[in-house]
Image (spheres, grey):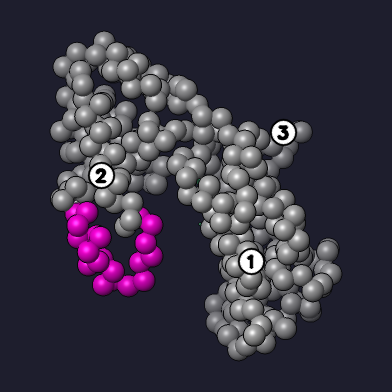
Amino acid sequence: MTSPHVIIVGAGPGGLASALQLAKAGARVTILEKQSWVGGRTATFEQDGFRFDIGPTFFLYPRVLSEIFHSAGFDLMAEIPMRRLDPQYRISFAAGGKIDATPDLVAMEQQISAFSPGDRGAITRYINDNRKKLERFRPVLESPFNGPLDLLAPSVLGALPSLKPWRSLGQELSSYFKDPRLAIAFSFQAKYLGMSPFKCPSLFSILSFLEYEHGVFHPLGGCGYNTFVFDALILTAGTFVIADRTKNTLTKQATWFWLECPVVDGFGILDLAARPRANGIGRRQGDFD
Ligand SMILES: Cc1cc2nc3c(=O)[nH]c(=O)nc-3n(C[C@H](O)[C@H](O)[C@H](O)COP(=O)(O)OP(=O)(O)OC[C@H]3O[C@@H](n4cnc5c(N)ncnc54)[C@H](O)[C@@H]3O)c2cc1C
């Protein structure tokens, strides 16, 4: 039986991770990327001898990437050395005061008590409650949602009481912290996802929890380093070829990158050898042979 051929559109972190796992599982993989580089929004650019991340500034919750690497036979921390930041960052408030956000909860309690005596104990309560919330919600976060009925899955319905979908993140934080500055300190993380803390659901309190409980990391060499390592892994695995107009060498390798290959509307047939541009993805078996 021939191995299945999978086409992935986009060589961002999502496409790269999928490619790695599919290739490891034995599939033939073709990745079509419209840009001339890989990495999507986590790519980097170089200027005057320095490398700059175009998107992410730090890395949260490495557990997921760690599992992806592990499934492909690699150790994340060995491949991508990361430094856990302490303090994670400093928050200076326009209304006065500052907090050095540290994962050391005893030190955080001391800072908060000095900052707002009425909020003594609040962060410990907040972290403990969010730990339980994430435990209940993690199976939901890690399940595929293939249709509206999946929203009625027992895992989703069971998690609802602790998610309190009727509450905004701002309302949730006000139930823990009396000082509005503290509500800001634990809610601005919603902006990572482009959301207003005062409008987004209270579920997103897990974002600041993740920072304090699981850490804020700097991959040495920048977040784009993830992408470079994926390239290296791919090449090391010996199954990937980066193919572009300049290196247009077809080989018997199982997995292909096509750069500068935007997928556009409609279904056409991709002629890899002649024209590195896809007019949609042909679904007939053999289109890529
Ligand atoms: C300013 C900024 C700051 C961020 N900060 C952080 C952070 O600190 N920490 C963090 O973890 N995350 C951060 N992110 C988010 C992170 O970059 C994204 O979550 C991640 O890149 C998403 O990966 P993806 O593969 O799903 O999509 P993308 O990275 O968007 O990759 C999609 C790829 O698909 C390609 N593509 C799209 N359409 C087509 C088409 N028709 N044909 C062919 N190719 C196509 C694109 O060119 C791109 O390469 C930040 C993002 C931005 C923009």
The percent position of residue 74, horizontal first and vertical second, equals 62, 50
**Horizontal placement of 23 versus 191: left or right?**
right
Mark number displayed over residue 50: 3
Q: What residue sits right under mark 1 in the picture?
A: 23
Along the viewing direction, whichever of 213 and 73 lies nearer the viewer: 73
Mark 3 or mark 2: whose residue is earlier in sequence: 3
Mark number displayed over residue 10: none
| Residue visible at 69% across and 53% down in the picture | 233
* Residue type marked 1: Ala
| Residue visible at 38% across and 31% down in the picture | 212
* Residue type marked 3: Phe
| Residue visible at 73% across and 63% down in the picture | 240
- Label 3, secondary structure: give it: strand
Mark 1 or mark 3: whose residue is earlier in sequence: 1
Q: Which residues are magenta?
A: 141-160
Q: Is residue 85 visible?
A: yes
**Horizontal placement of 154 versus 253: left or right?**
left
Q: What residue sits right under mark 2 in the picture?
A: 133
- Label 1, secondary structure: give it: helix
Query: Where, by quadrant of the figure, is residue 117 drawn?
Result: top left
